[in-house]
Image: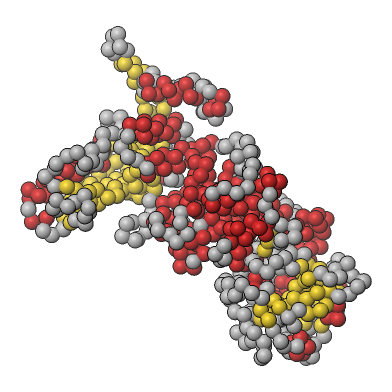
Amino acid sequence: MALCRTGPNPIPGSYSAQNLSTKLIVPALLRFTRQFSNLVRRKRKGVCCSSLRNAASASSKESLEDAPTTLSVCLEEETDHVIQFKMSDFKILDTVSVGLGGRPDEVIFEGMVKDSGSSLCNTRVVLRQLSSAQAQRRGKRAIEVLKKLVRRKLLYHSYSMQVHGYISLPASDASGSFILVHGYHGSFSLRHWLQQSDWLPTLEATLALDEESVRKVGEDFTGGPAVSRQLRLVRILMRDLLIGVNYLHSHGLAHTELRLENVHISPIDRHIKVGILGNAADFYKDGSNGSSLDNLDRRQMMIAFDMRCMGFIMAKMVMRELMDPLIFAKFKSFLTKGYDPSCLREFILEILGRSSPYGNAGLQILDRNWGAGWHLLSLLLATKPSQRISCLDALRHPFLCGPRWRVVPSMDIIRWGLGSTAMRIREKYIYRQPQQSRLAHFIDLMEMLNPHPQPRNWLELLPGKWRLLYSTGKHVGLTLRQPPLRVLVSDVHLTVTRESKLKDNLSFGSDIGFSVMIGQDWPHDKAGKSGRLQVNSLFTLRSGRRLYLKQDKTTEKFFFGPSSNVEALAQKFKGKKWRKIVPFKEFPSSLPAAKLASGDIDVRMNLDDPLNRNVDTARNVLQELRTQIPPEIFDLSRLVCGTYVDSRMLVLRGVNGSALLFTRSFVDRNGSS
């Protein structure tokens, strides 16, 4: 016989498999020897089969995932579209798959249909005995959902665990026992698949990937490097999952329980199964497709909840480090605090580091195609529900579309790609002129496509902590110089705070961390005496414009117009690729910008002992810092305007025309966020 109970009080003589939904205990099947007749005779607390209203009222305090559904018709009328089985119709097996671990109020076993007159004869099924009132409500809700989706049964069978019927057993003390019979779709949930050491080749074999199957996601071939294979598999699974969830949303239902434990992969039809839908919730409270404001808000919140769950599933599939509960808790805490998910890359690099046991395959996948994976992840996990992407839009996203499919990117994706590419170039920066030219080129492109030119937008987006990525000004390092003291600069941050919501005043503060290396062995030993330089100033933000000046070589006079480096941009924008998305037909002589007017400047520097005892040493350290860092960071009054800002990137211009590229940062090197 087969029995799997996940409760605090296991049945005597049987095996208690606790936490099967969160941890893979053994890859083999679980075996039991207890007779099923003893299980049936156990007293259970049930609900009356004539009505589900009592069950709904008993579970009124459940959360969103256990939202109650009240019905007022008898069980026979509710379940006339499914089969009412008897226990004699099944041959109970002596094994239970580890991936079927249920809730504490469920007992799970497997069986074979032995009724020769049934269309399911010799079919392996799962029998899920539901003991509590809430569990029985979930089972009857799964049958009710099937009745709603019966019009498109093909899609239901493809993307959901097929509910075949139920068994209603009489019990003593006027309590009923309800057993839900649903399809068997493999022994592992998606969580158990991802916990396998050889999950990638095993899943590829289970899905039987061939050229025809990969064409469904826009690919040309199978195989290749491990990163390409994992990306292809993520595309296949995510697209299948999105189609299944969209099928529910199009029928006015929200899943509310999208987790790795509830997702199974069928080796027969090679489709994702999104569970038995026992907690599926209706968009509209009264059951009608009303257009009232309350119904629309309820629908938006439910869809947004499902899409957030989809974001968690995608993040765990791509970055297997998030399968660790401690790391995932940090990941979820970042979102719970209200931080913008568009800055997830900055945060993930900090908590995962460069020495992950799984390598950096997940980061490589998300960085591909101009960081399209990070963009989709930020839309799935957006802080505001109204900003989260829908299933249909996610299916059209470039990250889930292979190279064979021609996808026209939106302006938002183009801006995202420009910023992501600039960040990647900076990470590989080795002080070469071609890289400097490319970075300056991308910064110019970003400024042309600035989505927030108005000062009111800057007042909302500018406050926060920004990390300096790159400056187009002069770069001076330590390699070819012999300074009095060798200073190694770490991160440079710019913190912007708004003094009052009623005023346009902003407080700028630059924070430069550095270490002073003493001795001749500094190329090999970078551990020196630490220090910190802080510069603060008040700014007033006004509306302004950035003018493009061009010099006439004959008269040596300046006039308004694009300079030589900007003329290349003008030619690029005239091409067919950019013509449809550029907001102007002719290249302008000026662009809107946020004008910055500074006040007094306060400079402070702290040095560790014994460097703080010598004034000359402090003077040399300060001079070396001024040599290495951009002058606009040391003297904030040199910042004259802002030319680009969004939730992730910032570009400020100095008085000499150099650009400073920043990315929003929530993480301190000391570990605080």
Taking the image as shown, residue 70 lies to the left or right of residue 118, namely left
* Quadrant assignment for the C terminus: bottom left
Taking the image as shown, residue 174 lies to the left or right of residue 614, namely right
Most foreground residue, 322 or 70: 322
Where in the figure is residue 567, as x and y percent of width and height?
Answer: 41, 21
Most foreground residue, 481 or 16: 481
- From this viewpoint, is residue 100 visible? yes
Looking at the image, what colour scheme do you see? Answer: secondary structure
Most foreground residue, 557 or 436: 436
In the displayed image of the protein, which residue is found farthest to the right? 117
Identify the image quadrant of residue 186. Answer: bottom right
Residue under the point 57% across and 65% down: 196
Where in the figure is residue 165, as x and y percent of width and height?
Answer: 82, 71
* Quadrant assignment for the N terminus: bottom right
Residue under the point 37% across and 20% down: 564
Q: In the image, is residue 6 above or below residue 530?
A: below
- From this viewpoint, is residue 254 visible? no
Residue under the point 60% across and 84% down: 8
Where in the figure is residue 75, as x and y percent of width and height?
Answer: 83, 74
Most foreground residue, 200 or 449: 200
Residue under the point 21% across and 49% down: 523
Where in the figure is residue 199, as x and y percent of width and height?
Answer: 58, 61
Q: In the image, is residue 250 above or below residue 43?
A: above
Identify the image quadrant of residue 423. Answer: top left
Q: In the image, is residue 356 above or below residue 617?
A: below
